[in-house]
Image (cartoon, helix red, strand yellow):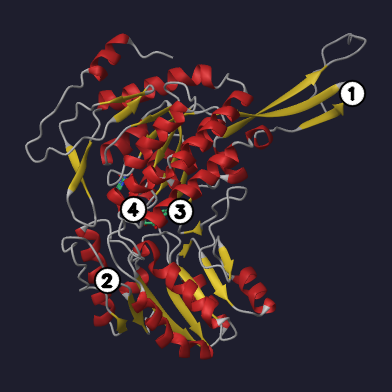
Amino acid sequence: TLLPLRTRAVLRMTGARLYASSSAPTTKLFIDGRTVESQATEWIDVHNPATNEVVTRVPKSTQAEMQAAVDAAKAAFSTWSETTILTRQQVMFKFQQLIKENMSELAKNITTEQGKTLVDAEGDVLRGLQVVEHCCSITSLQLGETMAGIAKDMDTSTFRLPLGVTAGITPFNFPAMIPLWMFPMAAVCGNTCIMKPSERDPGATMMLVEMATEAGLPDGVVNVIHGQHDAVNFICDNPDIKAISFVGSDQAGQYIYERGSKNGKRVQSNMGAKNHGVIMPDANKENTLNQLCGAAFGAAGQRCMALSTAVFVGEAREWIPELIERAKQLKVNAGDQPGADLGPLISPEAKQRVCDLVQSGVDQGAELLLDGRDIKVPGYENGNFVGPTVLHKVDPNMKCYEEEIFGPVLVSMEVDTLDDALEVINSNPYGNGTAIFTTNGATARKFTQAVDVGQVGVNVPIPVPLPMFSFTGSRGSFRGDTNFYGKAGIQFYTQIKTVTSLWKESDVSHTRAAVAMPV
Ligand code: NAD
């Protein structure tokens, strides 16, 4: 599994580096079981979103470094894919234990680099940990099928076998959960992996791969490269990479799906969203308004499953003033401050984009019932904060409805009937998540059957399935045909081999060759 000595020598040339623009520590590469200082000439600053101070610098990996990662993964595959399934299972048991032990350190890193509150950051880790726990069931999950006696003395078996080197490209908004959807699933099936975390918050991925290595993943089974377009193009084009898992925006996801597929790779691509919450007048008002607030404004709206559009049906529209009162009570602060409900947005550019989309709504005739754009957070005046914002009477033709806002902005509309709500949702190109709030079973059933969205909640605002199921966003929110984690995740990371055997007890030989198709 060792890299050529020359490559290792190049990678070991670390030493202290000084940078003209910043003395912040650098984020390392992780290649062949070791952290490695990059020889990159271009670096990206990572800022704490609450202060905009530089916390680390991320390299744009060189072509040689990315090739070294693939060489390490390719070499490791030949032995890791032959390692027994019980050994791979044991690594996952130990890995899940290490994640639990390091939960608060991981959460602190996420809050520093990504901005979300510490409690929410622990949730980010926990939802990924659940995938690792599910990987511990690999002894059942990777079972094949058998059929005895498909012909006289003849049996058929299928085996689910790993693919080879796989790659994962992740977004900024869940720096622990989403990498954990990828490399543990890939590795436990016997694959090796190259991770390319978001260049905006790579720290959690680095911590997690180091823990996985401590848990027993052999050198080269998981590697981390950094960068942006060049790293993504490298992954899409490298012939030794057999499959790509991507989560992020539409623009990147469609591009990666097309370029990776064109090069003969499997690609699963989870992309953007516009999730609608339907509020029926018979819903439990107290629960519904609280859940709506949590799902619209939690994580500052930077969740692909955020309920970013509220559709009030009939008399439920009378609850809107109460919703505004609850939204006003949410506390906006740096994520590590006690009592914070919402942290900052990821960058000043993200804040500007959110504010511009809110303004476009106002300009196109929506009612701005709550405006969080000018919020000031004492002690964090440089942070990228936006407070809860509500745009009401939004029309589907408005830009603030057409685009994913990805901020703490609830877009709200009124309709007369459930059918009208379904018409709005099913006309939207995205299909990630949706929820209905009602106390009527028949209404709920009608909605769940008629709505053309991949993940549906009934009185559950963010219906992200646990890992025994799969993450099943659909339509414009997904490209590919095999979803993340659960049974579908195992299918994605394995290929099927079918073996048909003939074992006769007494060998009665044919007198001449049979040339017709065997039946
Ligand atoms: P992003 O697309 O900007 O970045 C994701 C990854 O792609 C990063 O690693 C980045 O380096 C790379 N990338 C960015 N632009 C690229 C380009 N033009 N070409 C090639 N690669 C590129 O996404 P983000 O801003 O980090 O994340 C937010 C988005 O992710 C939102 O749209 C959100 O809905 C989506 N998301 C979806 C899910 C889901 O499961 N459907 C989950 C989380 C986030």
Residue 470 screen position, x and y as percent? 58, 50
Residue 4 screen position, x and y as percent? 34, 11
- Which type of secondary structure does the marked residue at label 4 adopt? helix
Q: Is residue 14 left or right of residue 224?
A: left
Residue under pointer 1: 152
For the residues labelled 2 and 4, the Cα–Cα distance comes to 18 Å
Residue 123 screen position, x and y as percent? 45, 53
Query: In this view, which residue lies farthest toward the front?
Result: 338
- Which type of secondary structure does the marked residue at label 3 adopt? helix
Name the amino acid, label 3.
Gly
Neighbour tally class for label 2: few under 14, some 14-19, many 20 plus, Cα within 10 Å: many
* Image quadrant occupied by the C terminus: top right
- Which type of secondary structure does the marked residue at label 1 adopt? loop
Name the amino acid, label 4.
Gln
Which circle marks residue 176 in the picture? none
Q: Is residue 212 left or right of residue 466?
A: left
Neighbour tally class for label 4: few under 14, some 14-19, many 20 plus, Cα within 10 Å: few
Q: Contact (CB < 8 A) between labels 3 and 2?
A: no
Residue under pointer 2: 357
* Eye-nearest disc, 4 or 1: 4
Mark sitting earlier along the chain (4/3)? 3
* Eye-nearest disc, 2 or 1: 2
Residue at 58% across, 71% down: 459
Q: Contact (CB < 8 A) between labels 2 and 1?
A: no
Residue under pointer 3: 123
Neighbour tally class for label 1: few under 14, some 14-19, many 20 plus, Cα within 10 Å: few
Residue 14 screen position, x and y as percent? 20, 22
For the residues labelled 4 and 1, the Cα–Cα distance comes to 55 Å
